[in-house]
Image: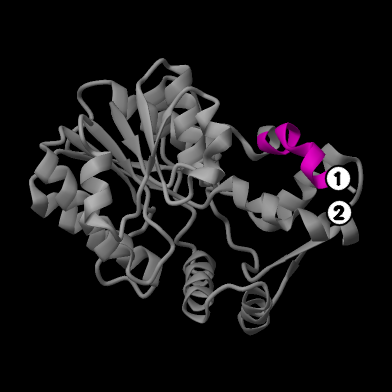
Amino acid sequence: MILVTGATGTVGGETVRQLAKAGARVRALVRNPARAQAIEGLGVEIAAGDLSDPGSLDAALAGVEKAFLLPPLEQNAVALQENLIAAGKRAGIQQIVRLGAMGEALDSPVQFLRFHAEAQKKLEESGVPFTELQPNGFMQNVLLLAPTIVAEGAFYQPAENAKISQIDVRDIAAVAVKALTEPGHEGKTYVLTGPRAITFGEIAETLSSVLGKQVRYVSVPPAEYKKVLVSFGTPDWAADAINALFAFYREGKGERVTNSVEAVTGRPPRSFEQFARDHAAVFQAR
């Protein structure tokens, strides 16, 4: 049995789908079972629980051999992950595959990357066998830009001309499935990227070609971007952390390209061109 946390999220949901397709026995940890209808239809077991509730984690981990730990977007993300790690150790779990991030470091000025490194350190110190996945930015985040692409033919990011080796979440999930269902991945860290580093200007050009209409990328100042994030309900600390991540990209630190996806799965990662074709309807919706 494999437990997946964050099972209704972007990475968690895709991983559940791919695990179910591979015939694995899956238990999805969800805070709100009402939101789990889509994955419940895949034949997976639903476990109501919360990373902040150790008792619910003990129940969810009963009979589980391996777990996929997805960090929550919370200020206490490290403590919440530590709860799952401790519960896994109590349950005698065989392996935890944890989702980190490319560039994570204990001394990083980027809060998200520092949180990831701190949580991974806790996992390593626990003695529980682990595998860490460290993806770069998700191509799926571009889907969040669809409203202005549809309405204005433009999207806005504080990235200037930064190159980022963005990765399709489907490829992250494919690596996670291999790490969870095959032997030999324990103790390993996989830095996961797309096939090349691209700018948001190149993303705009690709979308223009795929959609048959002009799409413009507009680089905006970080302060302006934060105002937009906060207006949509993003907590102040998270908006600052997102801006710090974009600063990391503007410094050229998101350009690294690896072959880890192909090395683990046997096939190359999807290009942004493929991603755009697969999701063209989202950017054309009215």
Q: Is residue 70 depicted above or below 118 in this figure?
A: above
Q: Which segment is the magenta one?
A: 275-284
Residue 285 image label: 1
Horizontal side of 176 relative to 125 (left or right) equals right
Three-letter amino acid code of the residue under disc 1: Ala
Q: Is residue 213 depicted above or below 222 in this figure?
A: above
Question: Is label 1 in contact with label 2 (beta carbons under 8 Å)?
Answer: yes
Q: Is residue 276 magenta?
A: yes
- Expressed as whole percent of the image width and height from the top left, the position of residue 32 reads 48, 50
Horizontal side of 114 relative to 142 (left or right) equals left
Which residue does the image show at 47% across and 22% down from the upper left? 43
Q: Residues within 10 Å of mark 2 (few under 14, many from 20)?
A: some
Please indicate, yes or no, whether residue 113 appears anywhere in the rendered image: yes
Quarter placement of the N terminus: top left
- Expressed as whole percent of the image width and height from the top left, the position of residue 103 reads 36, 58
Please indicate, yes or no, whether residue 269 appears anywhere in the rendered image: no
Which residue does the image show at 35% across and 49% down from the upper left? 49
Which residue does the image show at 57% across and 56% down from the upper left? 163
- Helix, strand or loop under label 1: loop
- Residue beneath label 2, please? 150
Horizontal side of 69 relative to 279 (left or right) equals left
